[in-house]
Amino acid sequence: MMKIRTHKYAELAYPLVSNIKGTGVEAKYRTLALTFPSMVMQSGLAQAVGFLMAKNNDEHKTLLEHIAKLLNYVDNGRGSSEALHRAILSSSVTEYQLLSRKALEATAWLKRYTQALLEKQS
C-alpha cells in the first residue's frame, strides 16, 4: 500500500519531536515549531528558511534539520539544511510552490507533535 505524503510526514516527525523532550532546546524549539508554519505563510518558504539559517542557534538548526529530513534532504542520515536551501533557491516557480506546500504539511506535523509532547517554558 502506498502511503500518502502526510502519513509519511506524521511517522517521521514523531520521533524527531519526541527526541527533543528533556533537552536544553525544548522550550525554544517548541516556540519556533509552533510559529514556523505561519512564518512560511506570511513570508514565504525561502525567507522562513533563511531566517532559521541566519539565527543559527541550536533550536533554529534543529528545526531546520528536522524540516530538511522530513522533506527528504538528507546527508549521512541527518537533515541537510544546505541541500534544502539550495533546492529552494534553484527551484522554478512551480517547484517552489510544491516545496512550500510540502514544507507546510511537514511542519504542521512538527507543530502538532510539539503541542502534544513538549513542555511550555515555565
Image: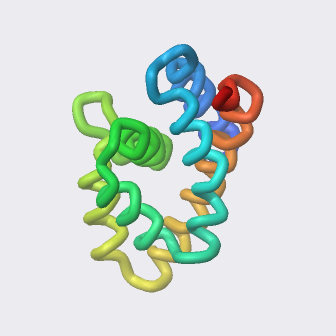
Q: Is residue 17 above or below residue 57?
A: above
Q: Is residue 12 left or right of residue 23?
A: right
Q: Give the x, y percent position of residue 36.
A: 58, 56
Q: Is residue 55 visible?
A: yes
**Total numbered labels:** 0
**Quarter of the figure that contains the N terminus:** top right
Q: Residue furthest bottom?
A: 93
**Quarter of the figure that contains the C terminus:** top right
Q: Is residue 27 above or below residue 69?
A: above
Give the quarter of the image for residue 87.
bottom left
Q: Residue furthest front?
A: 122
Q: Is residue 2 visible?
A: no
Name the residue nearer the viewer: 66 or 38.
38
Q: Give the x, y percent position of residue 90.
A: 28, 75
Give the quarter of the image for residue 102.
bottom right
Q: Is residue 111 above or below residue 51?
A: above
Q: Residue at x 52, y 75 (%)?
A: 44
The colour scheme of the drawn protein is rainbow
Q: Is residue 78 left or right of residue 3?
A: left
Give the quarter of the image for residue 35.
bottom right
Name the residue nearer the viewer: 47 or 71.
47
Q: Residue at x 39, y 56 (%)?
A: 52
Q: Residue at x 31, y 32 (%)?
A: 78
Q: Residue at x 60, y 44 (%)?
A: 31
Q: Is residue 26 above or below residue 53?
A: above
Q: Give the x, y percent position of residue 83.
A: 26, 54
Q: Give the x, y percent position of residue 108.
A: 68, 49
